[in-house]
């Protein structure tokens, strides 16, 4: 059985030039040479489920201020301040927060997205 795209509604709010690739049981969203988001809804480690946002550390605070549903990325209870933020799948306003992030991506907000070594095919 195919693994459907979780939080598929966001695809309606992203620009037409995005690329969605399935890897490791998750769906990676690219725009050009940048990874923008990862959509994860898996049975293992449900605390990692949600919409992952690629963002350099220096932009985390301003993004959280703008979209309060964004949380630090946490792995096994320890906050991980790498280059990812997370809208948890149990966030009260998940849909509204996700749409706001999609609007930022659509408008080319430089705080979201990380260059990848190899662009998706």
Image (cartoon, rainbow, N blue to C red):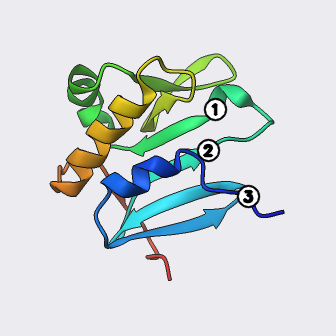
**Residue 32 shows in this picture:** yes
Where is mark 3, residue-wise? 3
**Residue 56 shows in this picture:** no
Query: Are there few (<14), some (14-19), or many (20+) residues within 10 Å of tag 1?
Result: many
Query: Are there few (<14), some (14-19), or many (20+) residues within 10 Å of tag 2?
Result: many
The alpha-carbon separation of the residues under discs 3 and 2 comes to 11 Å
- With respect to residue 20, does 88 lie above or below? above
The alpha-carbon separation of the residues under discs 1 and 3 comes to 17 Å
Mark 2 vs mark 1: which is more N-terminal? Answer: 2
Residue at 32% across / 35% down in the picture? 57
Asked if disc 2 and disc 1 are in contact, CB closer than 8 Å, the reply is yes
Q: In the drawing, does residue 43 fall left or right of residue 115?
A: right
Name the mark nearer the viewer: 2 or 1. 2
Mark 1 vs mark 3: which is more N-terminal? Answer: 3
- With respect to residue 53, does 3 lie above or below? below
Residue at 41% across / 65% down in the picture? 30
The alpha-carbon separation of the residues under discs 2 and 1 comes to 7 Å
Return the x and y of residue 95 as percentages of the image width and height. 41, 33
Q: Nearer the viewer, residue 41 or 80?
A: 41
Name the mark nearer the viewer: 3 or 2. 3
Return the x and y of residue 41 as percentages of the image width and height. 67, 41
- In which quadrant is the N terminus drawn? bottom right
How many numbered tags mark residues here? Answer: 3
Where is mark 1, residue-wise? 48
Q: Secondary structure at mark 3?
A: loop
Residue at 56% across / 29% down in the picture? 89
Mark 3 vs mark 2: which is more N-terminal? Answer: 3
Name the mark nearer the viewer: 1 or 3. 3
Return the x and y of residue 21 as percentages of the image width and height. 56, 68
């Amino acid at each position: 059985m195919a693994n459907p795209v979780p939080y598929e509604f966001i695809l309606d709010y992203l620009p037409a030039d995005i690329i969605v690739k399935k890897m490791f049981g998750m769906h990676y969203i690219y725009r050009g040479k940048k990874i923008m988001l990862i959509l994860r809804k898996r049975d293992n480690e449900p605390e990692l489920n949600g919409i992952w946002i690629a963002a350099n550390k220096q932009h985390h605070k301003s993004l959280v201020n703008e979209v309060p549903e964004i949380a630090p990325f946490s792995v096994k209870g320890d906050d991980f301040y790498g280059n990812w933020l997370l809208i948890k799948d149990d966030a009260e306003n998940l849909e509204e927060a996700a749409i706001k992030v999609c609007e930022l991506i659509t408008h080319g907000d430089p705080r979201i997205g990380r260059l990848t070594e190899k662009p998706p095919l």
